[in-house]
Amino acid sequence: MKQSSLKDLLEGGPPCHSEWNLVFEDTFQADQVDWEVWNSQAGASRGRLSSRWPENCIIEDGILRLMTHRGPHPDAPENPWTSASMWTRHQRFSYGYFECRLRYAPAQGLNNAFWIYRDSDQGPNDSLEIDFNEGHYPGEIAMALHWYDPDNREHRMTRSQAIDVPEANLAESFHVYGCEWNERFILYYFDGCVIRRLPHNVARGANMRLWLSTMVYPNWTPQLDGKSMDVDWIRAYTLTGPAKTHVSFGNTEHPQIEATGARSPVIEQDFHSIPEGAVPHAMGEILGKPAIVQSPPSRICTAVVPSEDGSRIQPAEPAQAKTDRHPKALRLMAPPHRAADTIHFDFPVQTGRIEVAFDLLITSPWTRMAIGLTNSFQTRPDYTRVEDPWAEHCGPYLLLEPSGYIEALEERRWIWETKARALGMLPAGLWNLVRLVIDLQKHVFDLHINNAYKDSAQFAQYQDALKGILFHKKTDPFEPQQALIDHIRISALKPE
């Protein structure tokens, strides 16, 4: 199994879930910008601080530099700064994957932009713009979608999100910014990691030009004079066929992974032989006071159906009392005035297909709980290892909320997103079987609750192995509730 390396991050590449065709690339190895490939603004920018000119687009040692200078251009005295803006002259784009390796200008007050744009082709208010990144020094990544309401062409719509990377200086080194755009989703990437998934039904059609640009903002500082946004390379890809995994993102009819083949046990953990009140041995982090407790009389929820209003799931048939199956269990709580209970179990490094299953009982519909799979043995080369497993890259991640259980991705604690829809409330007071089937080659996982397939999701494409499972009790909205866990079972699925 190929492992991520610094070389991979420098070279970039499209998501590995499908086969792609490289349709555009510029590595800026010439002495100057190829103006047969690119076009440039050459004039004033109304209402802006900087005019933009082709002479501010220069190439030095294989790096495109979009220069910023203080002082007006002779032909645009109304703009007190000059910057740069360039776009593909002839080539247009539609759905695909777009990426650029760039470095921010090392000063405040500049919009460092990589984006795609379509001019109006059905009247004055039909433009479409997808901002892959309009970043700002030192560590902000800003993503946006701009379009016009088809029912009201006077109404320009925007969906934007900015992420601050703590203690990061994105002007110190190059990073790869990418975006996957298809008929249903726009997925934003940072160094190969999905940092935002945006469902849409508006970004249609083609005829899009690829842009690189800078613009001076009112918060400029004198240090910006003579600085540049630097670009190593820029690429565009299209799919050569349908996505191989065809992840449903909300279509719960079919699993994405064939859970076939022999199961080779990796870890089997129950808590029946551990004394009450003791803390189980775990390789990894323990926070709070997780403890072994006597399991309350309960039933096992063997199968489920949606309720009539679709708001929650419920047993399909009366479940039988089986207290002997769970005489003791691991209890997690999050009472006030102390750390929420967290426990992390390490297991031998796993690649390929993995099945993770555990029994879970929540004492109230208001219980909040998080479960994640980690690869704490492997750290991205540009980040140092920290002791908190949540700071590592998580792939499959399940968040239990009062509104229902939600699949999510958490690449690091500062990059966080959830699926767009909840999947129904988990029955309280019953033992529920939670099962994740994971394919680390396709970077996909399927979620099953009580033997019913629920949904699928993707996770970071550089995560190619797992070595730990983490249970975290989140703070409850009202009185503190308990979550009980038993029968943790992790198996490797061998090829048939």
Image: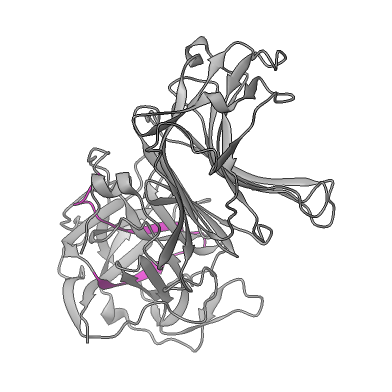
Q: Position of residue 145 (x, y in %)?
A: 63, 48
Horizontally, residue 311 falls left or right of residue 178, namely right
Q: Position of residue 358 (x, y in %)?
A: 31, 71
Asked if residue 130 can be seen in this view, the reply is: no
Quadrant hosting residue 353:
bottom left
Q: Position of residue 115 (x, y in %)?
A: 56, 43
Residue 481, placed above or below residue 437: above
Q: Position of residue 125 (x, y in %)?
A: 80, 47
Residue 420, placed above or below residue 252: above
Between residue 462 and residue 484, name the one nearer to us.
462
Residue at horizontal 35 percent and vertical 54 percent from the top: 472
Asked if residue 421 can be seen in this view, the reply is: yes
First to last magenta residue range: 352-380
Between residue 95 and residue 84, name the one nearer to us.
84
Between residue 21 and residue 139, name the one nearer to us.
21
Horizontally, residue 339 falls left or right of residue 33, namely left
Residue at horizontal 20 percent and vertical 64 percent from the top: 1
Q: How is the image coloured?
A: one colour
Residue at horizontal 17 percent and vertical 76 percent from the top: 265
Quadrant including the C terminus = bottom left
Residue at horizontal 34 percent and vertical 42 percent from the top: 339
Residue 467, placed above or below residue 234: below
Q: Can residue 443 be found in the magenta stretch?
A: no
Q: Can residue 357 be found in the magenta stretch?
A: yes
